[in-house]
Amino acid sequence: MELQTLTYIVVGASFALYIGIAIWAKASSTGEFYVAGKGVHPVLNGMATGADWMSAASFISMAGLIAFLGYGGSVYLMGWTGGYVLLALLLAPYLRKFGKFTVPEFIGDRYYSQTARLVAVICLIFISFTYVAGQMRGVGIVFSRFLEVDILTGLIIGMGVVFIYAVLGGMKGITYTQVAQYCVLIFAYTVPAVFIAIEVTGVALPQIALGSTVSGSEVYLLDKLDQVVTDLGFTAYTQGTKSTIDMFAITVALMVGTAGLPHVIVRFFTVPKVRDARISAGWALLFIALLYTTAPAVGALARLNLIDTVNGADGQGTAYEQMPSWFSTWENSGLLAWYDHNGDGKVQYAAGSAMVGKPKFDGEKRGEYGERVVTNPSKGEVVKGAPYANELSVDRDIMVLANPEIAGLPNWVIALIAAGGIAAALSTAAGLLLVISAGVSHDIVKGMLAPDISEKQELMIGRISAAVAILIAGYLGANPPAFVAQVVAFAFGLAASSLFPTILMGIFNKRMNKEGAIAGMLTGLLFTMGYILYFKGIFITPMAENIPANWLFGISPEGIGFVGMILNFVVAYVVSKLTAPPPEHIQHIVEDIRIPKGAGEAVAH
Amino acid sequence: MSTQAQQAYWKENLRLLAISLVIWFIVSYGFGILLVDQLNQIKIAGFGLGFWFAQQGSIYVFLILIFYYAWRMNKLDRKYDVHED
């Protein structure tokens, strides 16, 4: 069957499944809308958390990042999993015992302050929208490449599906849909990985294949990769290029940021008991680890396959006309480009950049060999140690999607990848949209503006804000602001430097008062934001070049949340020592959340 | 429950937390980042040990840690009679 027809069938069937689940799990109360009635089984909650957490970034981008960064990509692997240890040990059980609906609600109550709650809501909304925009871009890429519809049509379909199950089903609908989406995405990710692992190493388990020998030789896969990439002028695959301090800081920022992301924390409000919250984080990590331990193998194999295919058996490049069909398909999507620096008609891949920044195309104009004409080629200098100048520009985001085609896998596997990518993006988008809608309807409207509204009215406002959030997210997906990729650092930095320390101190430091918490949150927030703006210049021109020589202690903007977090802790501690202790009843609340006994139904008010 | 028992429960919890977090730190930041070059001298199949911890091993240890902590806390909850239902 044709690839496109197959893809339509597989993606269409998965959509029908999600909508069916949504209708079955319609929410009828605010408790069900915000936290699924606190009745979700811990294993199912773990699966839903896995889908919620694994976004387009995990599914589509991460293995590509690892493929090109090698050892340096480890920051994402450790950072995005290690945060679950912090969640399970330090946050989830206590927040579940507290028994409210949202993260800002906890902060507002614990610090007896509407200001603290407001700061937390603003952080939450900013973090979540940043994230949603990225998901929508992921949906757009998959649709435009595999279904060959334009991005806008793809987005509208995606928005429509999310709308049905998020607005109708609330957290309850989302949770059960995410369970289904997890199954789709993990199947879609691992099946091609197993195929390719067998093809290259003869070992089926990708986790083992990464450490095995290449079929028909005595050479280990990683050793071969090190050899091949250094011959092309790159740093060895297992060495990486980041400095130790930067690796350290980025890993901390990602771990702590993960533990502080509101859409992840809120998942642990949905289970019935405190002990379920602890174990549920373990199940979540198990389901996440299935993908995260597969990704390094996918990355390594993708890099090797790409080099083999492009440079050919003799390592001298492959004539453009002889490149397999995936090459021109991705070229058409603009995510891959070739400029023939040495004019031999062959595509060659080596260290160095083939274009100045991202490739720019001269409309649909074709060159001598039928390739798309690029208007911004680099000088085509040969990097030290490389045999020839690099002529190829590959967007990292296409590695996972193109991998099955590069490896020549059957069409149904490729169709599956499309459905998996869409499942990953939609499940995360839905979780984020729900957190935004709860922030608006529960924290801002019900908590601050109009405390007297009935549950029914609050539910209605929740649905309306979810709908509005979907429209904004769709708009951001269709017109992605140039800074989407850059603000991801923002989301983790903000969560790490503002929300996480404040929640942690609220549980583990009885003496922490509102003055300390607010001062700490604002310090962490402003410092982290300031540093990222200084180098990345979102909305403004960067004030300094984003290079290691200019960085504070050699820490990149991606890792600066680490320093922001420390500042938050220090400032909060000092200020709280200098001001009055929190009232008696707050200290009792803290004592109470430390003990599991008595965690009942969700106490709304 | 008495304040004294409550404090003892909390103290045991903090001890368990400290041990778990030390392990969490060692496998990721220690083995995966700070000591990666030294550990890469040790080869197990095709992996340098440091590289393996950074891309595989730390994740497995994280998993074991969470389940171990949950199991120990369930026991602790019963010991101090603070468990639910």
Image (cartoon, coloured by chain):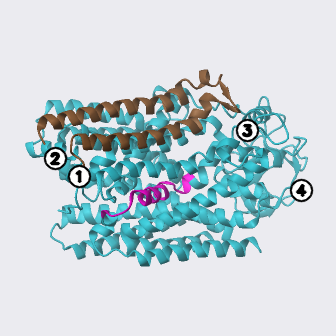
Chain colours: A cyan, B brown
Name the amino acid, label 3. Ser
Q: Which residues are magenta?
A: A38-58
* Residue linked to disc 4: A322
Q: Circle 4 sits in a helix, a strand or a loop, which is it?
A: helix
Query: Vertically, is A315 above or below A51?
Result: above
Name the amino acid, label 1. Phe
Q: Of B57 and A399, which appears nearest the observer?
A: B57
Same chain for labels 3 and 4? Say yes or no.
yes
| Pointer 2 local density, CA inside 10 Å: few below 14, some 14–19, many at least 20 | some
| Pointer 3 local density, CA inside 10 Å: few below 14, some 14–19, many at least 20 | many
Could you tell whether A516 is left or right of B22 in the image? left
Q: Of A96 and A308, which appears nearest the observer?
A: A96
Sequence-wise first label, 1 or 3:
1
Residue A599 coordinates in the image, percent (x, y): 23, 54
Q: Which mark is residue A98?
A: 1
Sequence-wise first label, 3 or 2:
3
| Pointer 4 local density, CA inside 10 Å: few below 14, some 14–19, many at least 20 | few
Name the amino acid, label 4. Gln
Could you tell whether A390 is left or right of A483 in the image? right
Query: Vertically, is A4 above or below A528?
Result: below
* Residue linked to disc 2: A589
Query: Vertically, is A492 above or below B17?
Result: below
Asked where in the image residue A129 lies, by quadrant, the reply is bottom left
Q: Circle 2 sits in a helix, a strand or a loop, which is it?
A: helix
Same chain for labels 1 and 3? Say yes or no.
yes
Name the amino acid, label 2. Ile
Are the residues flagged by discs 1 and 2 in contact, CB closer than 8 Å?
A: yes
Q: Circle 3 sits in a helix, a strand or a loop, which is it?
A: loop
In the rendered structure, does residue A385 fall within the stretch colored magenta? no
Q: CA distance from mark 4 to mark 1?
A: 63 Å
Residue at mark 3: chain: A
Q: Nearer the viewer, mark 2 or mark 4?
A: 2
